[in-house]
Image (cartoon, helix red, strand yellow):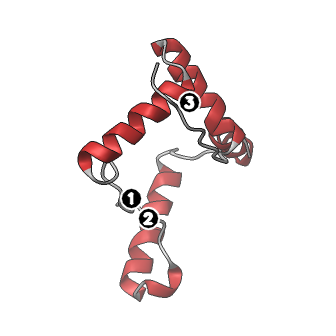
Amino acid sequence: MARTSNVFARVEPNIKEQAESVLDQLGIPMSNAIGMFLRQVVIHRGIPFEVKLPENTPLSLASMTKEQFDTEISKGMDDIEQGRVFSAEEVAAELRRDFGV
């Protein structure tokens, strides 16, 4: 058996649990998945996937022109008129489910 070395990492508990759930379904122990990731880092000589900011970043009021602000307000009003709304309770429940907030 190959000699091994320990890796210690701090991760958010909910992310660890979600990852464990997926890996359990795949039949891959967490330590093997981490080893696979590190091998890919070596092979790619970097992170083995694209790392970039999301395209849909939240809007900043300070960076918007009056026209952009008016457009965004119009979109929001249209969403309300079309019934595309969520209650505060629905948003809170989704945050708890997705992020453990």
**Crowding at label 2, few (<14), some or many (≥20) Cα neighbours within 10 Å?**
few
**Crowding at label 3, few (<14), some or many (≥20) Cα neighbours within 10 Å?**
some
- 28 relative to 36, above or below: above
At numbered mark 1, what does the secondary structure look like: helix, strand or loop? loop
Residue of label 3:
19
Alpha carbon separation for disc pair 1 and 3: 21 Å
Check residue 20 in the rendering and tell me which mark sits there, or answer none: none
Q: Between label 1 and label 3, give the one nearer the viewer.
A: 3
Q: Which amino acid does label 3 sit on?
A: Ala
Residue of label 1:
54
* 25 displayed left or right of 55: right
Across and down, in percent, residue 13 comes to: 71, 39
At numbered mark 3, what does the secondary structure look like: helix, strand or loop? helix
Q: What residue type is labelled 2?
A: Thr
Image point 34% across, 46% down: which residue? 41
Q: Between label 2 and label 3, give the one nearer the viewer.
A: 3
Q: What residue type is labelled 1?
A: Pro
Tell which of 23 and 68 is nearer to you.
Answer: 23
Check residue 57 in the rendering and tell me which mark sits there, or answer none: 2
Residue 96 in view in this figure = no
Q: Earlier in the sequence, mark 2 or mark 3?
A: 3
Q: Are marks 2 and 1 in contact (CB under 8 Å)?
A: yes
* 11 displayed left or right of 76: right
